[in-house]
Image (cartoon, rainbow, N blue to C red):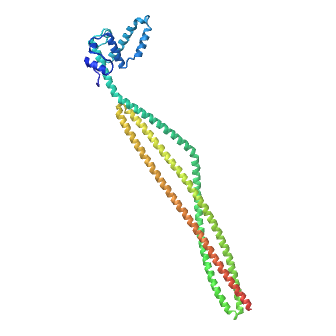
Amino acid sequence: MSKFDYPKLSVAEIISILADSQIAIITENDLKNPNPDFISDLYTRLLIYLDILHEEDQGQLEFGALEQLENPDLHVGSVQIMNLYSRIKEVVSSVDCPMKFTLKDLVRPDATRTEYFVSAILNFCLHKDTKMNLLRPIAEDLTILDEQRREWEAKIAQLNAEIATYNEARERELPVVQEVDAKVKELRQTIQDLNKHQMSLRTSIKKLKEKTGELEEKISQAEFDLVQSVQQNADLRSKIVQSPDKLQRALEEKKSVRDEAKNAERVAMQSFQEKTATLEVYTKVLKKMSKHFAQMQAILEQVNSAKSIERDYKALKTKFSDDIVSDKSLEAKLVERQSKGRNLKFQEATKELENVKVEVESRRRDLEARQRKVEAVVAEVDAITSKTMSVKESGEAKLQELANKAEEVFQQYSHSLGVLLVTEAEAGAGTLALA
């Protein structure tokens, strides 16, 4: 029954309901010919079934009432009857029964009135059982929701503890980050200075190449002069017998040419030594610059990694704040819709929770994609750094090659000059012998 009323139950229905509810086992004769003991026991069982009366409470009430009397042994039965009468009267009155329950119905029960009162109380029992069966799923849902609420509170407390730990770690690492930022600024300034120095080195290398070209031109000219000297020497040998005076003048001219060649050789040697020293200094500076550049790249990678971790931490903190706001909004929605039905509220809350989970998963995927993008950028930076180092190594190799070539040219020039000097010495010795 969804609404409480007073349909008169038959004797067979009363007996069946009492037996099915495990209240009492009675017969039709018990209801047709009721006696005070049977009626008292039946009403007591009905009150116990309705959870209005407890056996231990009944004993305590009777003992407390008997203590107020002079001869309690003489009033045990009357106190029990009055207590039972009071409880039955309250129950009949609370269910708005149109017929009034009196003490006579308990002491000298009438079959018709007894059937009416028992029928009314049983109707209320059936009505109560029906309502309790309807409320039982809601109570179970409330229990589940309460457990879920405690789980979420525990999870929120755990996340708050993790946030506090992250904040403490961030505060501890803040001086290190500031120090790294200062080093980064210093390294950037160093990079600018090294770039300027590298430009000046390139300019010096260019000038050195130009001077090397000039030196090669001078060597070519010296070789040409050497060939002319050999030819002139041959001409002089053919003219030795004919003109000793001209030969003497030619020897003097050759000596002056030889002195000029020695001076030129000495100047070239000094210039070559200066260029070699400059090249060595440039090479050492280039090595130091490469080492500083590698250290700078390592520190920049550490800084980028720290900044990436800080960005991820801020993103996680923002996501967690959004989750807390979402949880609070869900709790507010749950409280607001509690009066409209537990089942509908639970379904909507579950749906909202699934949406939150989907959103969290989507944010996690976006974060992973960003991380992969950052890793790709770092790999690209590493590739550019490797390419820069290879270019530097190639430049060093070219510088070394130029130095080797200059040394080889100088050796060839020294050798040719030595041959020339030896030839001239032999020619002078021959002339002296003829004289």
Identify the residue at horizontal 62%, vertical 73% (top origin): 406
Q: Is residue 98 visible?
A: no
Q: Residue furthest bottom?
A: 242
Q: With respect to residue 424, does 111 lie above or below?
A: above
Quadrant of the frame with the N terminus: top left
Residue at image point 51% right, 60% down: 384
Residue 25 in percent (x, y) is at 31, 17
Q: Is residue 327 above or below residue 110?
A: below
Give coordinates of residue 117: x percent, y percent: 29, 15
State the image quarter where residue 400 is shown. Answer: bottom right
Quadrant placement of the C terminus? bottom right
Q: Percent x, y for residue 191?
A: 58, 58
Q: What residue appears at the point 40 percent right and 37 percent down from the top-left corner?
A: 330
Q: Residue 192, relative to residue 344: is it above or below? A: below
Decide: is 333 above or below 243.
above
Pick whichever, 404 or 271, lies toward us. Answer: 404
User: Does residue 83 appear in this view?
Assistant: yes
- x and y percentages locating residue 328 in the rendered image: 43, 37
Q: For this rendering, which residue is in front, 375 or 129?
A: 129
Q: Is residue 430 left or right of residue 54?
A: right
In which quarter of the view is residue 393 placed?
A: bottom right
Q: How many marks?
A: 0
In the picture, measured across the screen, residue 360 lies left or right of residue 1, that is: right
